[in-house]
Image (cartoon, grey):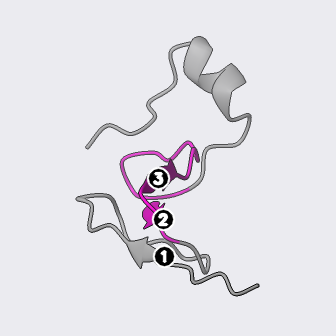
Amino acid sequence: MSTHSTKQAVNTALYASKSPLEWAITNNGTLYTAQIPIDGNGEVVAGGDAQKKRGGNIGRR
């Protein structure tokens, strides 16, 4: 049995990650996205979603 992956990176307007990841990819017709809270400088926000719920400046430029 042979499976062929069609994984493709999706271009976004998000900051280039310092980690080896893509913000979004498609694979065999399905879209996958990275859910990482970042601030206006492209830095990961400590506390993640909890910080966002308290009104943190996540994803704003």
Q: Residue at x 39, y 39 (%)?
A: 59
Q: Nearer the viewer, mark 1 or mark 2?
A: 2
What residue is disc 1 on?
7
Q: Position of residue 50 (x, y in %)?
A: 70, 21
Amino acid type, label 1: Lys
Verify CB contact (< 8 Å) between mark 3 and mark 2: yes
Q: Is residue 33 left or right of residue 36?
A: left
Classified by dominant secondary structure, the portion drawn in magenta counts as loop
Q: Position of residue 42 (x, y in %)?
A: 43, 58
Q: Residue at x 57, y 44 (%)?
A: 35
Q: Is residue 10 above or below residue 38?
A: below
Q: CA distance from mark 1 to mark 3?
A: 9 Å
Element type at mark 2: loop
What residue is disc 2 on?
28
Q: Residues within 10 Å of mark 1 (few under 14, many from 20)?
A: few
Q: Earlier in the sequence, mark 1 or mark 2?
A: 1
Q: Position of residue 15 (x, y in %)?
A: 35, 64
Q: Please report the bounds of the magenta region as a residue range.
A: 22-43
Looking at the figure, which quarter contains the N terminus? Answer: bottom right
- In which quarter of the view is residue 29 placed? bottom left
Q: Residues within 10 Å of mark 3 (few under 14, many from 20)?
A: few
What residue is disc 3 on?
30
- In which quarter of the view is residue 46 placed? top right
Looking at the figure, which quarter contains the C terminus? Answer: top left
Q: Is residue 31 magenta?
A: yes
Element type at mark 3: strand
Which of the pair 5/17 is nearer the observer? 5
Amino acid type, label 2: Asn
Q: CA distance from mark 1 to mark 2?
A: 7 Å
Amino acid type, label 3: Thr
